[in-house]
Image: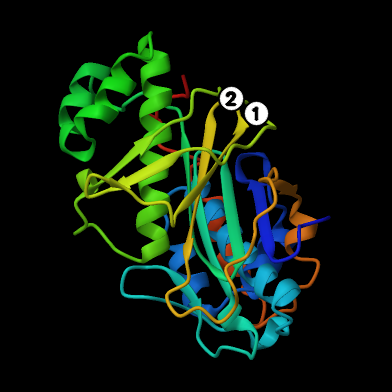
Amino acid sequence: MTDRMGSVRWAFRCSSWVPSRSDWLFAARCVQPEEKERIGQFLFAKDAKSAMAGRLLLRKFVCDKMRVPWSEVHLERSPRGKPYLAAPVEDSKHWSFNISHQGDYAVLAAEQGLQVGVDIMKNSLPGSSSVSEFFRIMTRQFTTHEWSVIQSAGSETRQLAVFYRHWALKESFIKAIGTGLGFNLQRVEFHLPTEALTPGRPLRRTRMHLDEEEDSDWLFEESLLDEDHHVAVALGPAVKPVLPTPHLPPPENFTLLSFGDLIASASPLTEEDSAYWEDFKRKAEAPTRQRDSL
């Protein structure tokens, strides 16, 4: 598994993961007790698996890249929900990391010397409304320019794909700066490149305007993990720079990890809890009314 120096892009396909009893119980032992409890509260197995994968991705990153022993990794969340290392090690201040899970995947992006935010969106039909009604509800989340790009994309399927592309870009920026729902999303406007985004060929050419002026301090990597899953990675200047701003090589694809990769460095933190497996087995995989991808 190769990552360029100071940069990590990992993905795990949660929908393909059918954990055995031993896998699920071992995973549960390898996350912090409060996270294990939170994961156990999800109604559906799909959400529990995604949350578990997200925590394992974070711990693997801190263990493998920041050289903190698994048993000493203690992660907390900012008031806005962004994960951070509670007891920073000497080199930790150089790293920024973030995760996202939606659709079939959980993803992690990390970078040295830059702020990082990542968001993944699956192209899916709105649950209970038409596409036009869905867009009407979301009107205030996008600028006039962005809506013109979305609605000129062609078919409703293409319009939804461009909608989710813009949404992932906005969310990646919000997550990078650590701001929650109070941020007015119309303050940021994205200008997409003319070059098509295709699976296996990440781009870093989208530009952001903040408060109607182009902000060249921020870069945005975009990837299609497959035809249905769009990932955006926001890269911005560190709040308190401790390293020179890195010169970034071309963007790389996300590396798809297996469950074995996730737990390769893991060590149990708690005793086995057999009831945790019984509870997981009782969960339905996903809501029965959940609509499929496009």
- How are the colours assigned in the image? rainbow
**Badge 1 density bin: few <14, some 14–19, many ≥20, Cα 10 Å:** some
Name the disc covering residue 118, or none. none
**Closer to the camera in the image, 150 or 30:** 150
Q: Is 154 positioned to the left or the right of 202 in the image? A: left
Nearer to me, 164 or 122: 164
Determine the image quadrant of residue 109. bottom right
Quarter-wise, where is residue 163 in the image?
top left
Secondary structure under badge 1? loop
Q: Is residue 193 above or below residue 81?
A: above
69 vs 87, left or right, is right
Q: Position of residue 131 (x, y in %)?
A: 27, 19
Residue at image location 75% in from the left, 65% down from the top: 263
Q: Which residue is mark 1?
A: 199
**Percent from the top left, x then y, of residue 256?**
73, 46
Q: Percent from the top left, x then y, of residue 137?
A: 16, 31
Q: Residue at x 38, y 9 (%)?
A: 154
Disc 2 target residue: 227
Residue positioned most to the right: 1
Q: Amino acid at mark 1?
A: Pro
Whether residue 47 is visible here, answered yes or no, is yes
Residue 116 placement (x, y as % from top left): 50, 61
Amino acid under disc 2: Glu
